[in-house]
Amino acid sequence: MTLTIQHDDLLPGRNFIAGQWREALEGQRFGVTDPATDAVFATVPDSGALDAAAALEAAHAAFPIWRAVPAKQRAQILNRWNALILAHQDDLGRLISREQGKPLAEGRGEVAYASSYVEWFAAEATRANGDVIPASVPGRRMFALREPVGVVAAITPWNFPAAMIARKIAPALAAGCTVVCKPAEDTPLTSLALVKLAEEAGVPAGVLNIVTASRERTPEVVDVWLDDPRVRKITFTGSTPVGKHLARRAADTLKRLSLELGGNAPFIVFEDADLDAAVEGLMVAKFRNGGQTCVSPNRVFVQSSVHDAFVEKLAARISALKVGPASDSASQIGPMINARAVDKIERHVQDAVARGAVTRVGGARLAALGPNYFAPTLLVGADGGMACACEETFGPMVAITRFETEADVTRAANDTPFGLAGYFYATDLRRIWRMAEALQTGLVGVNEGALAAEAAPFGGVKESGYGREGSVHGLDDYTQLKYVCQGQL
Ligand code: SIN
């Protein structure tokens, strides 16, 4: 199977600013690599401050026009965009797999996931109601109008190059905001393809602008948007250190922020759990996208009495995983995104083993497949002092910690600065509610490993960030309330 794109027009290969496909003003380009081989297979503009400023100028000029477009019309444009995304599901899926490395079934699945957000926010656009407030004195009427915040800067990650763009751009456009976007340097092609389809769907010139930049030049682009008071909101998915940097810099102009940052998700298996369901839930949650997912379980706790049985079942499932390039339809785990990602997993395995963990499955690179492959790995005997318990591994590695009591595991699960997702498997209803309430995370999976849905509020607590994406709350971060009081009636 090849990952060739059927429709070349999905590969514009340039920035999109003010309704025009443009080279970077300084003319530079950088290479996009195939994570399966590290070979460069495409190039895109390496933009700098001038391009970022041009994109912002366009978004700022388009804002009064776009916010005045009736919500129903904005919704129709989003629906057309969604239809085009679905019509190109195969090509977009191949593109995601090519530049990101995930198996093709997951690439196609991600397109459907992205589409679900566009469809959702098209509908939400027409429901962005304000309030009529009972007046406190006679002769007065009081209203709360919901208005778009203005220009939004969307900075998106490489692990879900289509879904994360959709989850940020669709609510922004639905609310009446205009957008400047900088996609991750590892996966710019999917983002450009989505913007191409948005153009085809009728998003007016200047409303949606995108500039690509290499890792080295990204700060130059983002700094322009951070410093300019006309950008009223930053939406970012990525690491906690970068999120903190953005929050500090955005403080000068008091921009709104939605930050979906790193996680360190606990996955807890209690002795009253259905062990087979728990194994399946962990496989889904952990090995989706090769573990390169913010909500991926990072610390797996198993109660002593079921520990050995659980480990045996899990070892059998992990050993059977097929690793290979996305172009092989049998692959279930693709390459990691780049060499840094593989180095980190290797460091976590080595650290855990040096501190007493035992490798049950995998534990090493799969260099014969290519530069960025790591074997699905199962370690037992992990503890809270290991690097894999303190940092997000972001790879196909499960490290199991044994626990004795609910109180112990609750303490351990919450003993982290992060709080994005948490999972547990149990059948006792009282325990289920105790744990659902006790976990300090923004998302909780109870007997469920696949949490995400466009109708659900996605986001974290603590140092995993703030703001919610998706759901009926998903427009809140892109709108502000204006109180209007009319007197003399
Ligand atoms: C993420 O990893 O940032 C998003 C994962 C998801 O939407 O499930």
Image: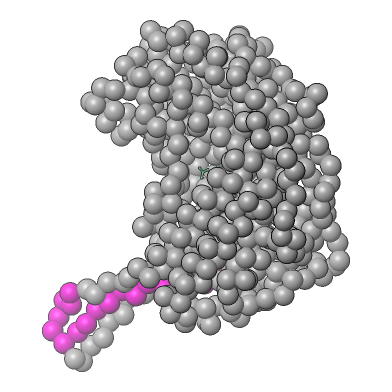
Q: Residue at x 40, y 23 (%)?
A: 277
Residue 328 horizontal/vertical position (percent): 70, 34
Say whether residue 220 is magenta.
no
- Classify 35 as above or below 280: below
Closest to the observer, 432 or 260: 432
Outermost residue to the bottom:
488
Closest to the observer, 167 or 6: 6
Residue 466 horizontal/vertical position (percent): 46, 49
Q: Residue at x 40, y 32 (%)?
A: 448
Residue 283 appears in the rendering: yes
- Classify 242 as above or below 422: below
**Magenta highlight range:** 134-152
Closest to the observer, 157 or 99: 99
Q: Report whether 3 appears left or right of 74.
A: right
Outermost residue to the left:
138
Identify the image quadrant of the N terminus.
Answer: top right
Q: Residue at x 45, y 13 (%)?
A: 310
Q: Report whether 396 appears left or right of 304.
A: right
Q: Residue at x 49, y 60 (%)?
A: 118
Residue 388 horizontal/vertical position (percent): 59, 24
